[in-house]
Amino acid sequence: MDDLIQLEHWAGALLARLEPAARRRLTRAIALDLRRRQQQRIAAQRNPDGSPFAPRKRQADPPRRKPGHGLRSKSGRVRKKAAAMFQRLRTARFLRPQSDAAQAAVGFAGRVARIARVHQYGERDRVSPRGPVVQYPARRLLGLSAADIEHIRQTLLDHLRG
């Protein structure tokens, strides 16, 4: 967090020299780039510090009607591999950039913001409306890594060079 505060002080002095329209364009570009980087990191199932997300809890297999082995549980059908977590949550529809002349931010919009918060901080929530309450492990969906901060710094320098 100290790096972010240092970046804010360093960038604030440089950005104060720009016209408001130029600042808006720059913060918009940074917000869009941050969204793209966050989407890639969520798709890779990584926390901002580089550690992998806590794995999904393994679901109990449904009882088989006919004995079978390997990937086939019923004749002619192949079991599907578990889908990656947060596929729809990371889309542009829900993961929205926000910017103005003073700031750039990326966050979740609408009703999915609650779902994202539960996973971001590892809170308790119901699996379904009448389902059991479950303690979710913390999976940091949003956050800045050292590489993100360096990328923002480089974007600012490139913009100021012209």
Image (cartoon, grey):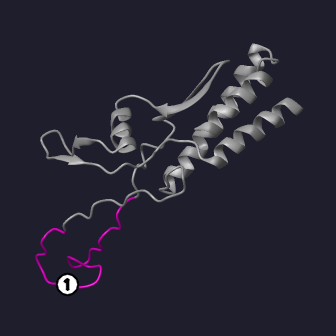
Hey, which residue is sitting farthest top in the picture?
Answer: 20
* 46 within the magenta span: no
Q: Is residue 66 above or below residue 88?
A: below
Question: Mark 1 sits on what residue?
Answer: 68
Q: Position of residue 92 (x, y in %)?
A: 51, 38
Q: Which quadrant of the figure has residue 63?
A: bottom left
Q: Quadrant of the C terminus?
A: top right
At 46% across and 59% down in the image, what residue appears?
52
* 80 within the magenta span: yes
Q: Position of residue 107 (x, y in %)?
A: 49, 32
Q: Quadrant of the N terminus?
A: top right
Q: Position of residue 11 (x, y in %)?
A: 74, 28
Q: Which quadrant of the figure has residue 53?
A: bottom left
Q: Nearer the viewer, residue 111 or 161?
A: 161
Locate residue 149 relative to residue 35 in the image: left or right. Answer: right
Hey, which residue is sitting farthest front in the picture?
Answer: 2
Locate residue 142 relative to residue 64 in the image: left or right. Answer: right
SS assignment for the magenta stretch, majority: loop
At 82% across and 32% down in the image, what residue appears?
159
Give the residues drawn in magenta, as a range.
61-83
Locate residue 123 relative to residue 143 in the image: left or right. Answer: left
Find numbered disc 1 in the image and state the secondary structure of the residue it sits on.
loop
Q: Is residue 100 above or below residue 159?
A: above
Mark 1 is surrounded, within 10 Å at the Cα level, by few (under 14), some (14 to 19) or many (20 or more) other residues, namely: few
At 38% across and 58% down in the image, what residue appears?
54
At 54% across and 56% down in the image, what residue appears?
50
**Which three-letter amino acid code belongs to the residue tagged 1?**
Gly
Q: Position of residue 32 (x, y in %)?
A: 63, 35
Q: Nearer the viewer, residue 29 or 137?
A: 137
Q: Is residue 59 above or below residue 105?
A: below
